[in-house]
Structures are given as structure tokens and as C-alpha cells.
Image (spheres, rainbow, N blue to C red):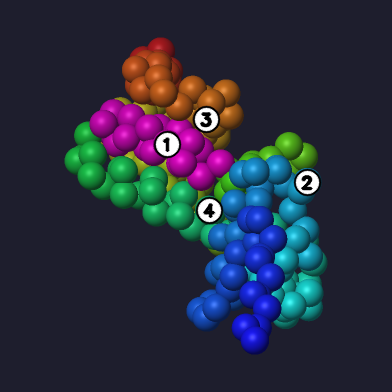
Amino acid sequence: MAGKAAPAKAPGKRAYHHGNLREALIAESLELIREQGVRGLTLREIGHRLNVSRTAPYRHFADKAALLSAISKTGFAKFAEDLERARDRAGTEFGSRMDAMARAYVRFAAENPGSFEVMFGAGRQPQHLDESASAEAQRAFAVLHEEILHGQQTGAVAPGDSLAFARLAWAMVHGLATLRMFDDQKFTDFCSRALRRGLSPGL
């Protein structure tokens, strides 16, 4: 007599086999955030989707806040790498480097909506400007601040408060990303040029 067939898994439920559970929890969280937003994220649901015990996620994250903090740090680390890569590939000219970083910023928001929502979601502090922020968040802002300093040293940026200039640049490009102008690179370049004109000496 043939044995009964194994029950089918619930739709959408993913089997977790081997590897780094912490990384799997973060990856699955980003997928759930993409589908339902941050409010839909729970450790219990993530564990269910990965087919692990109810207590397994808590061995890595004490609560939802700890999970969100890890997602934010991971996101900022990748974000900083993307900005640095775009800057370095653009050569040595200040304008080209700023344009490349602006495109990288908008592209990151388009390609990583879950991370972006956690990093900059409504109600969250602008931690990239806060000395108490994570090292990953500080590094991301430092990439831009260092470029402003470089622009001042080469004469492309007016003398003055480099930190304020960096905050201005961040705010403008963040607005583009938040408004989801992902497919309009010409407009991104236009805004970057307008920003550079505003930062240039003699105005």
C-alpha cells in the first residue's frame, strides 16, 4: 500500500536549508517589505516564510527594531559602496564625480526599495547626518562630504561650510529619489548641474 503523499507547502512559504540564517532573515525581510511595507514585517512571519522554528529568528534579533537596525546598516554599507564606485569610475573632475554619485543615489533607491524604506522611512531620524548614527550611515554621508571638500580644494566649490554644502547636495538628490524619478536620468543630470552651479564660486 502506497504511503500518503507529503502535504504541499503553503503558497509563498520558502524552505530554508543551510547557510547563514541571519543573512537569510535580512534578505527575506527585504522581500516582505517590498510586498507589504515595513508595517507588515514581523519576526514570526519571516521565520514562517523561511520554514524555521518560531524561536530561530530571535537567536539573531531580539525584536523587530533590532532587525530593522541590521537592515539599515546593511543597506547603508551597500549604499556607500555604490557611491564610492560611481565616484571613482567618473575620473577626477568634480562635476563628473558629482553627477555620477547623483545617478548612483537615485539608482540605489530604485533597485533597493526595501532597504531604502528602512534607511529613510517616514519618522526615522536623518541618521546620515547624526554623529550617533551607525558607522555605515556615517560612511555613506562621508563619501559626499569628502567630495565637497575636494571641490573646495580644486576651486570647483565656493569656500564656506562644507558640511552645510554636503547636506544641501544630499537633500536635493534625496528628493529626486524619494519622488521616484528613477527613469529620468536627464532630469537627474539637470538637477546635479544646477546644484553644482549653486555651489560654484562667484555666485
Q: Which element is circle 2 on?
A: helix
Q: Residue furthest bottom?
A: 1
Tell us which disc is closer to us: 4 or 2: 2
Residue name at image x 59 percent, y 70 percent = 15
Badge 2 density bin: few <14, some 14–19, many ≥20, Cα 10 Å: few
Report the span colored magenta: 94-113
Q: Nearer the viewer, residue 29 or 104?
A: 29
Question: Which quarter shows the C terminus?
Answer: top left
Give amino acid for label 4.
Phe
* Other residues around mark 3 within 10 Å, as few (<14) / some (14–19) / many (≥20): many
Q: Where is residue 68 shown, x and y percent of the image?
A: 69, 57
Residue 109 included in the magenta stretch of the image: yes
Residue for badge 4: 76
Q: Residue flagged by tag 3: what amino acid is it?
A: Ala
Query: x, y (%) of residue 170?
Result: 52, 34
Compute the Cα span from label 2 to label 1: 24 Å
What amino acid type is highlighted by mark number 1? Arg
Going from the N terminus, do you reach mark 4 or mark 1 first? 4
Residue corresponding to mark 2: 39
- Can residue 134 be seen here? no
Residue at x 32% of width, y 35% of height: 100
Asked whether disc 3 touches disc 2, contact meaning CB atoms under 8 Å apart, the reply is: no
Secondary element type, mark 4: helix
| Mark 4 surroundings within 10 Å by alpha-carbon count, few (fewer than 14), some (14 through 19), many (20 or more) | many
Is the Cβ of the residue at disc 4 closer than 8 Å to that at disc 2?
A: no
Residue underneath mark 1? 107
